Amino acid sequence: MKTLIKNVKIAKSGAMYHTMMIPGIIFLLIFSYIPMFGIIMAFQDYVPAKGIFCSNFVGLKHFMYMISLPDIAQIVKNTLIIAVGKILIGTFMAIAFSILLNEISKKFLKKTVQTIVYMPHFLSWVVLAAVVVNMFNLDGTINQILVSFGLDKINFMGSNRWFRPLIVGTDVWKEFGYNSVVYLAAITAIDPGLHEAAAIDGASWWRRVINITIPGMLPIILLMAAMSLTSILSAGFDQIYNLYTPMVYETGDVLDTYVYRIGLVGRQYSFATAVGLFKSVIGMILMLTANGLAKKYTDRKIF
Amino acid sequence: MNNNSIVKRITVLMLISIMSFSLVACNDKDSSKVKESTQIVENAHGKYTEEITYTLGRLTVQNSKLPEGDTYENNAYTRFVKEKLNAVCVDAFEANGEDYDRQVSLAISSGDLPDMMRVGDKNILDELVENDLIADLTEVYDNYGSDYLKSIYDSYDGRALDTAMYDGKLMALPGTNVDSAPSEVWIRQDWLDKLDIIIDEDGNGCITIEELEMVAKTFREKDPGNSGNPVGIPLAYWLNSNDYGGSNHCMTGIANAFGAYPKLWLQDEGGNIYYGSTTKETKEALGVVKKWYQEGILDPQFGTRTWDDITALLINGQSGIVFGAWHIPDWLLNNIRAMDNNAVFSAYVIEDENGKANVFHNNASNGFIVVRKGYEYPELAIKIANIFYDEFANSKTLATDAPEVAKYHVDAVDGAARPFNIEINKYTSLLDDYSDIRRGVNGEIPVEEARTVESRVIIGNVTKYLKDYENSNVTDWAKYHSRMKGVALIEKLTNEGTFNWVNPVFWGTTDTMKTNWANLEKLEEEMFIKIIIGAAPLDDFDTFVNDWNKQGGAQIIKEIQETLK
């Protein structure tokens, strides 16, 4: 009996919950906080042998160099177009899918569909790139279909017109199922009484979606959108790296891939760090702004 | 989350940061303090009394042909080193192609180098030296290098060792690079026969651009490989190589025929340095490839094909024209023969308008073996080199001394299985060895008289192939092609004086190259591809030259001019 009371006490005090946080905190410390010291590299001419404590400080040299690069405008533009495209279309698809999926009443069918659209999320781009290339190259499935309709072949993988849509499209296809989990949860949290009342008042399904489901989901939608702003300058390195060639640098070369080529392959570590820091700072500013707006309009905030 | 725990977390963070700062003080700690080797070994081939280990960075190949059960870490070669020197090999990392360079970059940035590794790039070597990460090998080379090993390096008049010399110190063991010119064009002879095409009527071993065009066109129209989707000539998107050894799937051979030498630093008669990719000859060569693309002679998917994709085209019989050095039958074309028993290739060089074959001298070194500073047994690197490049090369009794190794030679296991994936050969070795092989095959000399083990094995391969070429195995087929066609062509062109040699003047990296080269390379690759696929007119080449000069090219030329003074 005594032990039971003691256990209840422990549970009430919240100590249990805090203990549960320990692995996460340790993980954060090791993989997020300690590496932050590496940011110092961005302001140095980093030399591996000297380490970050002995390399020479050069101030903002690498940031200046970044701005002076002839291609930087094009690369930032590519990054923004691809990232914004992914966020907008991806979010829209996930929301639409979750609303439609919610209408399926047969549990078995619902689960099956869900599993199928989840699947691609768990495959790596290295694997999927091979699939995408086989679908979209000149002799690929898509082109064979085009030819059978009497249309011209399109060199998707090598065309600056098609490369961005291809990147955005395949990424949305890969992720929308997984991203819809949150929205599904939001939909189920909406009071069914509201729907019933609206139905009695003669509201159509479409009306109910517009006036009940979407407003009920809005806080979550805004929250997710704000969160995704942090990655506005990350257009998905693995995906693009596995699909691009110099032919589509013009539209497909993004900050991550460019920094990878110049920084790691060219071994300019400080420069790569500077660009990484630049990305993080922009991402943080955007997120704080979004968080402020979310707080103002929806009374919800991320932190 | 109550305030208390936030305070705690911040405290912990502060503590950690203070600790990590205090751990790393900025003294010039002498990492070079080598523990005095406990075992002093007098002679060059001596064995360590206690077992020692060496960790390696290993450049691997895709198809090593290692026998079942053997690995890069544990195979006939490493076992021989263990037996002979009592040194055990442990691989720190193994990777292939570009991935390997990435691994090396990572090893350098983490400061965690293997005891020995192969470095491909002169600028990485520069960096290792600047950062004081690798050992000075001057003394161990002098003390432990065998006479024969030294005589190999001497045959380059110092050109090879110089590439690894810093302030008079030998900082790496350079792999030598014999001239492997030219970039030959390998054409499916069986298809030529099938379609009754006759090329090189004057028999000088060279064909004209027009002949190549005609062959590519006919192959595309007639589809002799029955692939259903012939593609003409496939080229890799990087288009050019500054080394014949890496020129497969490149247009280097085409460019050379126009007197263009892309990706090389050259000097004109007035002593001015210029970059080969920016010359009007290169423009001309690009114009030809552009025309091919328009006419469908070039692979319509040029620009998006990877190296592996192109290899697949050849294996599937969609193309029968390959550019590359004399040795590609051994590791690239053999895959084609493995799929198609009838595949036979002939090798040619594309000639210029005067019937000459323009070629450039290779960089005298290719790849470096470096030893980590602080490694206890730096002399081990030299001893390993003695075994592989002297003992194995010259041994007349290898079959009894090291039967396992001899079998590797016969089975054509790739040299990447050796601890050091570099070659150290005499400057004239290519044609020397070939003359041994030629005479051995013709019965002019007994097989035993051939100077190297490899030559003796190859004489066996070629003889077997000639006896019954229809049922020959792939290795015999490959050795026959690489030597009796690939190198035979080089000997022929050398003897007939068809070669017109050009000497590139600079192989290193200048300061501006360190920051701007990646960008200039991007500029070049992008522009060349655009021109070829018709996304830009040929005259945009002049814009490219301007941009290239503006974005650091002119400055780099100045810097090279300085270093050569």
Image (cartoon, coloured by chain):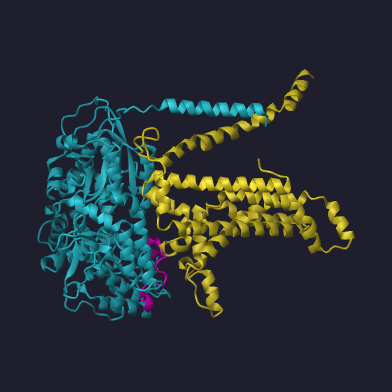
Chain colours: A yellow, B cyan
Residue B68 appears in view: no
Q: Residue at x 30, y 38 (%)?
A: B131
Q: Which residues are magenta?
A: B292-311
In magenta stretch: residue B124: no
Most foreground residue, A38 or B78: A38
Is residue B391 visible to the viewer in this orientation of the structure? yes
Quadrant (top left/top right/bottom left/bottom right) for the N terminus of chain B: top right
Residue pictured at 39% horizontal, 61% vertical? B308
Q: Residue at x 14, y 47 (%)?
A: B158
Q: Image point 33% across, 48% down: which residue?
A: B59
Q: Report the side of A201 relative to B515 (left or right).
A: right
Residue A106 location in percent, x, y? 77, 57
Could you say where residue B288 lies in the image, as x and y percent from the top left? 30, 74
Residue B470 on image: x %, y %: 28, 68
Query: From the viewer's perspective, is residue B200 above or below residue B93?
Result: below
Q: Quadrant of residue B481?
A: bottom left
> Residue A117 sits in which quadrant?
bottom right
